[in-house]
Amino acid sequence: MLPRGLVRLSQERYFMTGKRKVTRESLEAQFSSLCRNFDDSFKTFLSSNGFAVFPGFCDVHVHFREPGFSYKETVGTGSRAAAHGGYTAVCTMPNLNPVPDSREHLDAVLAPIRASETGVNVLPYGALTVGEAGEIPADLDAMAPDVIAFSDDGRGVQSESMMRSLMEKCASLGMILSAHCEDNSLLHGGYIHDGAYAAAHGHRGICSESEWGPIKRDLRLAKETGCAYHVCHISTRESVALIREAKAAGVNVTCETGPHYLILDDGDLQEDGRFKMNPPLRAREDREALIEGVCDGTIDMIATDHAPHSGEEKSRGLEKSAFGVVGLETAFPALYTHLVKEHVISLEKLVELLAWNPRTRFGIPLDDAYTVWDLEKSAPVDPASFLSLGRATPFEGMVFSGECVLTSRNGKTLYQNKEIINAHTTEERIHG
């Protein structure tokens, strides 16, 4: 028998594009073979302790801040945080200094990735426009061989004609365009959701249309251009409805949401910078629509939008703190506790959202990667235990089930919980 946690999922196929092709069947077959070939001592360790084994998780939306902002995070610290959370592949966003908008600037981004020895597969995005300013197209041709996709994450492309041109270019290159959808003309200085909490506490709000308006535009353009279009961190009920309708019409679109949007809403807000992210926590009705979108397949994957900042940058309250929270080390426990244990989705569905779907859409191989979890262990979230340099999480103090025991890729241990391992066996037994 295969170790507990090996899941058999549906054979649903995803839109494929470009030079990379990874199928669900090939991923499942590789993972099955990997588990069958575990040595006997490792199988005994897993079965005797009731640990769960999953394919290495894959996050298509993280910020590792290097180069340019290494005081917030580095490729090394971000990768170690990823492994601690069970992730063996991550896609890093381009809001860096320099922005990877040319071959020269991309090489500066690739240098610390190639120098990293953590073993996590770090795959950078290239920017869509020069400096992510939305005015001049970046050199997509020069960057295409060495980036996972293109995005101006952190900023929305405001011009329809520019977005059309970028979609046409991405389609010609066979690359995914991953969009941060935000209409600047509708922001009005807002920093949390334009809802009940903002009204009651005198905060400036961000309206939902600032997100779903650009999504509506982009879905039309994606249909017209044939571009493989991916929507980042959706947070509103209207976004879910628009994407569901577009999928039914055959548009080549996928989307992600984050764990915090599925578990929290603006009724949970506190006057603390750890509750500030972009897009913001929306209303209860939005959270419920997102959950429905996860259940019916409208939302294809869950990405953390891991966005670390310094303690000082997150200490200024809701109005003045920087946007962004960390998420790599809490994602699986949060989702397992609030979605799986509450019978909202199955464990198989969660693995689909965290491992299979992001890999098939973005063409990211499994690389003999797996992660081992103790699903019975529960503990409150303690940011002091994070391996990320970032500490700001809205989940601080919440009690989640699930603790990572081990993460491995291509035969290399990326993370191990020595306390749990030593309590059950010797290190030699783990590594065979």
Image (spheres, rainbow, N blue to C red):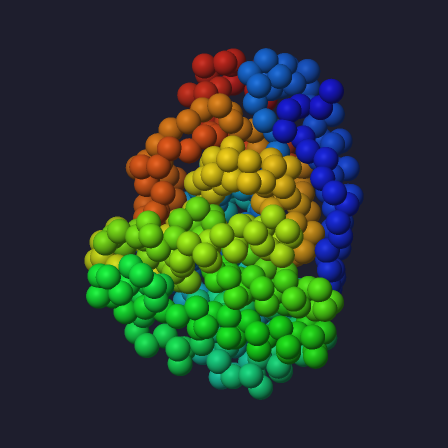
Of the pair 227 and 384, the residue shown nearer to us = 227
Of the pair 76 and 200, the residue shown nearer to us = 200
Q: Is residue 6 visible?
A: yes
* Residue visible at 48% across and 30% down in the picture: 402
- Residue 392 coordinates in the image, percent (x, y): 32, 48
* Residue visible at 58% across and 86% down in the picture: 161
* Residue visible at 39% across and 40% down in the picture: 387
Of the pair 15 and 284, the residue shown nearer to us = 284
- Residue 154 coordinates in the image, percent (x, y): 44, 67
The mark tally for this picture is 0
Q: Is residue 313 visible?
A: no
Q: Is 404 situated above or below 135?
A: above
- Residue 185 coordinates in the image, percent (x, y): 40, 81
Of the pair 293 and 30, the residue shown nearer to us = 293
- Residue 95 coordinates in the image, percent (x, y): 44, 66
Quadrant of the snapshot with the C terminus: top right
Q: Quarter-wise, where is residue 246 in the image? A: bottom right
Q: Quarter-wise, where is residue 208 in the image? A: bottom left
**Residue 21 left/right relative to 286:** right
Q: Quarter-wise, where is residue 407 in the image? A: top right
Q: Is 157 situated above or below 327?
A: below
Quadrant of the snapshot with the N terminus: top right
**Residue 38 left/right relative to 79:** right
* Residue visible at 44% across and 46% down in the picture: 263
